Image: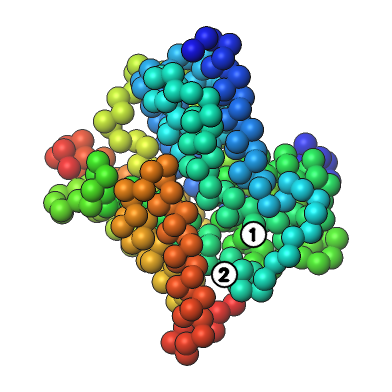
């Protein structure tokens, strides 16, 4: 692929980002919206996050892990535990990241999990 | 938009920035590793920089990187990115209720920079769309501030990653901080029984459907989780849902 071609393609990928993120509000036309769909949207945010992260935690090379010695499980569990212990107080999410990485890095780099 | 004084002088703008800053280390680590991964997978520094600045979608950048390196046809690359980004289409259906009363160019600018994390924080902060102008301005200011800081932080971290790629080994696994940031945000969303069900069903479905191409497992998982929750809503077990 020519150099110029690659940059045109990258610009096209930027347009894809714009179109997908704005898909349902990029036109001025009103869309008919059933009430069940409206109610269903209450469950969409957490479903989207879960669908993105759970495979990142419990799968490796496209298959479910069978070995419990995996730094990611312990790190995610420690991070979530910290969140529920500190919730309602400031920076619980920040603590989730810090505690999770404090568990992850020694297990991953030290023990090779 | 963030460059409109009516937004950046509004107190909600700062509130949005404060909320997203609680996950800043995760965003930085994730952005950094996305930059590193693009270059280590064989993209030139110039193309990786253009990807960072123009595409601004980590998962689709990583998905198309090997295709760009291999010289895959344009249409295939664009279709792949579209499918990987399909979850944003679902999220835009929700944001529509908050944004339709703004001019189109503002919607597009804001839509372009609003990624998963900002969407989640925004809908958590404003569970119901406002119907008065003051409330709508507060929503606009919050989302602008939140998305803007997310965008800046990601851009800087990614560019650092692109330019220092040879110094940072991927196997350190620093990118996992991004997953942990999402774990924290997910915990903060799990405030009702049905939302916890949604997370569980979606996670299981995403693993079960992982073999689907183009990360379509994520879209399938969202659809299954929402459908299950809608069915369960009618049972007494579900309790009161706000």
Does B231 sit left or right of A96 as displayed? right
Where is mark 2, residue-wise?
A40
**A50 above or below B153?**
below
Residue B34 location in percent, x, y?
43, 31
Chosen colour scheme: rainbow
Count residues near mark 2 (Cα–Cα under 10 Å), then give few for <14, some for 14-19, many for 20+: some
Question: Which image quarter is the C terminus of chain B in?
Answer: bottom right
Residue at 17%, 42% (x, y): give it.
A113
Q: Chain of mark 1?
A: B
Local secondary structure at mark 1: helix
Residue at 60%, 37% (x, y): give it.
A17
Q: Residue furthest bottom?
A: B236
Q: Quadrant of residue A107?
A: top left
Residue B141 location in percent, x, y?
74, 50
Does B33 sit left or right of B85 as displayed? left
Residue B83 seen from this side: yes
Does B170 sit left or right of B234 as displayed? left
Where is mark 1, residue-wise?
B94
Q: In front here: B43 or B9?
A: B43
Count the numbered circles shown. 2
**A37 above or below A82?**
below
């Amino acid at each position: 692929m020519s150099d110029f071609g690659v940059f045109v393609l990258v610009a096209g990928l930027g347009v894809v980002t714009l179109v997908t993120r704005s898909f349902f509000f990029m036109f001025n036309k009103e869309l008919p919206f059933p009430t069940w769909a409206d109610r269903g949207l209450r469950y969409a945010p957490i479903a989207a996050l879960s669908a993105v992260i759970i495979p990142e935690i419990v799968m490796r090379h496209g298959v479910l892990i069978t070995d419990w010695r995996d730094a990611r499980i312990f790190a995610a569990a420690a991070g979530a535990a910290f969140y529920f212990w500190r919730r309602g107080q400031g920076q619980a999410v920040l603590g989730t990241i810090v505690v999770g990485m404090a568990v992850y890095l020694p297990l991953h780099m030290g023990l090779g999990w | 938009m963030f460059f409109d004084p009516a937004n950046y002088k509004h107190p909600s703008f700062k509130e949005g920035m404060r909320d997203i800053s609680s996950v800043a280390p995760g965003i930085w680590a994730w952005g950094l590793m996305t930059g590193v991964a693009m270059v280590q997978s064989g993209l030139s520094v110039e193309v990786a920089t253009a990807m960072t600045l123009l595409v601004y979608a980590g998962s689709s950048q990583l998905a198309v990187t090997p295709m760009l390196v291999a010289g895959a046809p344009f249409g295939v690359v664009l279709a792949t990115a579209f499918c990987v980004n399909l979850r944003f289409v679902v999220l835009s259906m929700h944001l529509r209720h908050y944004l339709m009363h703004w001019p189109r160019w503002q919607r597009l600018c804001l839509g372009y920079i609003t990624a998963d994390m900002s969407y989640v924080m925004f809908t958590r902060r404003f569970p119901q769309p406002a119907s008065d102008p003051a409330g709508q301005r507060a929503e606009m200011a919050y989302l602008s501030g939140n998305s803007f800081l997310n965008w800046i932080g990601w851009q800087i971290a990614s560019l650092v990653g692109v330019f220092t790629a040879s110094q940072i080994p991927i196997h350190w696994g620093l990118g996992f901080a991004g997953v942990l940031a999402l774990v924290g945000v997910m915990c903060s969303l799990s405030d009702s029984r049905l939302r916890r069900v949604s997370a569980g069903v979606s996670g299981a479905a995403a693993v079960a459907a992982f073999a689907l191409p183009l990360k379509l497992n994520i879209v399938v998982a969202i659809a299954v989780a929402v459908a299950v929750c809608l069915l369960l809503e009618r049972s007494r077990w579900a309790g009161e849902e706000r």
